[in-house]
Image (spheres, rainbow, N blue to C red):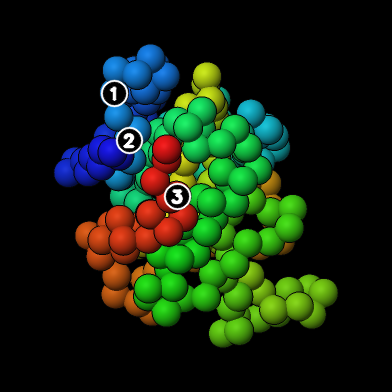
């Protein structure tokens, strides 16, 4: 069984890291169930293992944390659903690429419940939406905005970190970084797309779509 935890208050980032470190060790030892943790953070930036210093545009704006996960710079803050995914890939298959694909499929299936067509893009981790309502990209192709970021880490084949989905964050807070190192793309949210979705609405959809993306482990 997977344990679902929903935080009701903003969770400090260092506190979240400590919890994940402890829980991942317990899962690896067989002392705790796999865990999905739904939460929000206060405004902050995190640096993944591939982060470039030049992508931190405003280092004094919010606290900056070394996350230890894959990826580059990411923003977290109120109105964004952070989903920390602590699953045992010893039981679910030791295939990192397949696992990241499953995370993307989970987000895509969840957003489909709100009539959003979200897609993955080769060479760009995360989930994207096409914006025909916005000016085209410089090359003439339709603009694409990122609605969900993905960054994971594995220890003893147990995952942690995970996904962030923009529900109604202050999108101007992303201006302090180059999100995920991609300068030519924007960032959007469910509310920015004109959908009055709440975190609770999203949580229900995430729970409903989980088993589709992650069939029960043997």
Quarter placement of the C terminus: top left
**Residue in the foreground of this view, choosing between 91 and 203:** 91
Q: Residue at x 62, y 46 (%)?
A: 98
Q: CA distance from mark 2 to mark 1?
A: 8 Å
| Residue 1 seen in render | yes
Residue at image position (74%, 53%) is 123
Q: Position of residue 163 (x, y in %)?
A: 46, 46
- The percent coordinates of residue 142 (x first, y second) are 69, 79
Q: Residue extending furthest front? A: 218
Q: Secondary structure at mark 3?
A: loop
Residue lying farthest bottom?
133
Q: Secondary structure at mark 2?
A: strand
Q: Which residue in the structure is indicated by mark 1?
A: 32
Dot 3 or dot 2: first in sequence order is 2
Which is more toward the observer, 167 or 135? 167
Residue 72: image quadrant is: top right
Measured Cα–Cα span from mark 3 to mark 2: 13 Å
Disc 2 and disc 1 in contact, CB within 8 angstroms: yes
Q: Are marks 3 and 2 in contact (CB under 8 Å)?
A: no
- Judging from the image, what secondary structure is the residue with disc 1 in? loop
- Relative to 175, is 96 above or below? above
Residue drawn where x is 59% and y is 67% of the image: 119
- 149 to 55, vertically: above or below: below
Q: Is residue 186 visible?
A: no
Give the residue number, with chain letter if any, for mark 2.
35
Tell me what residue is drawn at x 37 percent, y 73 percent.
113
Residue under pointer 3: 214
Q: Residue furthest left?
A: 8
């Amino acid at each position: 069984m997977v344990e679902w935890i929903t935080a009701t208050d903003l969770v400090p980032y260092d506190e979240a890291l400590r919890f994940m470190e402890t829980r991942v060790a317990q899962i690896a030892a067989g002392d705790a169930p796999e865990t999905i943790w739904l939460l929000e953070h206060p405004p902050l930036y995190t640096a993944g293992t591939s982060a470039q210093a030049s992508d931190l545009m405003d280092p004094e704006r919010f606290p900056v944390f070394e996350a230890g996960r894959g990826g580059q710079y990411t923003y977290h803050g109120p109105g964004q659903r952070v989903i920390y995914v602590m699953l045992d890939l010893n039981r679910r298959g030791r295939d990192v690429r397949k696992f990241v694909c499953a995370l993307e499929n989970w987000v895509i299936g969840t957003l489909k419940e709100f009539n959003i067509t979200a897609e993955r893009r080769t060479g760009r981790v995360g989930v994207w939406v096409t914006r025909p309502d916005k000016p085209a990209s410089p090359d003439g192709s339709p603009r694409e905005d990122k609605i969900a970021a993905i960054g994971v880490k594995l220890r003893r084949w147990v995952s942690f970190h995970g996904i962030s989905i923009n529900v109604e964050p202050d999108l101007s807070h992303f201006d302090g970084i180059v999100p995920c190192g991609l300068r030519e793309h924007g960032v959007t949210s469910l509310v920015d797309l004109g959908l009055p979705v709440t975190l609770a609405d999203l949580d229900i959809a995430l729970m409903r779509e989980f088993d589709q993306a992650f069939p029960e482990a043997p």
